Amino acid sequence: MAGQTENKFDMPMGLSFQLGMNPKAMDAYGKLNDEEKRQVMETARSVTTKSEMHQIVERLERDFY
């Protein structure tokens, strides 16, 4: 957006939205260490569709919960 700078530590909006809809994945994300969280956010920044973002969140729930 104009006038806003992206902070590399800010969670992508799509990831935040998808995590908000999936409490188990949100809990799993909260248990990750800082490096794991950074990796998830970097992966989320590279997606181009809602479906891809949804898959990231489902993977969190499945692999870390």
Image: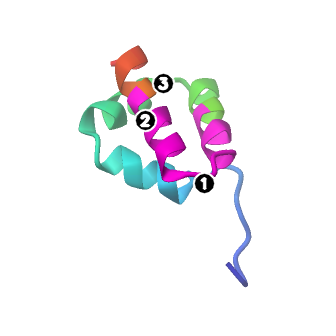
Q: Is residue 9 above or below residue 35?
A: below
Residue 32 disc label: 3
Q: Are marks 2 and 3 in contact (CB under 8 Å)?
A: no
Q: Earlier in the sequence, mark 2 or mark 3?
A: 3
Callout 1 amino acid? Asp
Callout 2 amino acid? Val
**C-alpha distance separating marks 3 and 1:** 16 Å
Magenta segment boundaries in residue numbering: 40-58
Instruction: Provide the secondary structure element on which disc 2 rests.
Output: helix
Instruction: Provide the secondary structure element on which disc 3 rests.
Output: loop
Extreme-top residue of the structure: 63
Name the residue located 70 percent from the left edge and 58 percent from the top edge: 7
Query: x and y percent of residue 33 in the render?
Result: 54, 23
- Mark nearest the camera among 2 and 3 is 2
Query: x and y percent of residue 5 in the render?
Result: 74, 70
Name the residue located 60 percent from the left edge and 43 percent from the top edge: 44
State the image quarter where residue 4 is shown.
bottom right
Visual colour scheme: rainbow
Query: The C terminus appears in which quarter of the rendering?
Result: top left
User: Label 1: which residue?
Assistant: 10
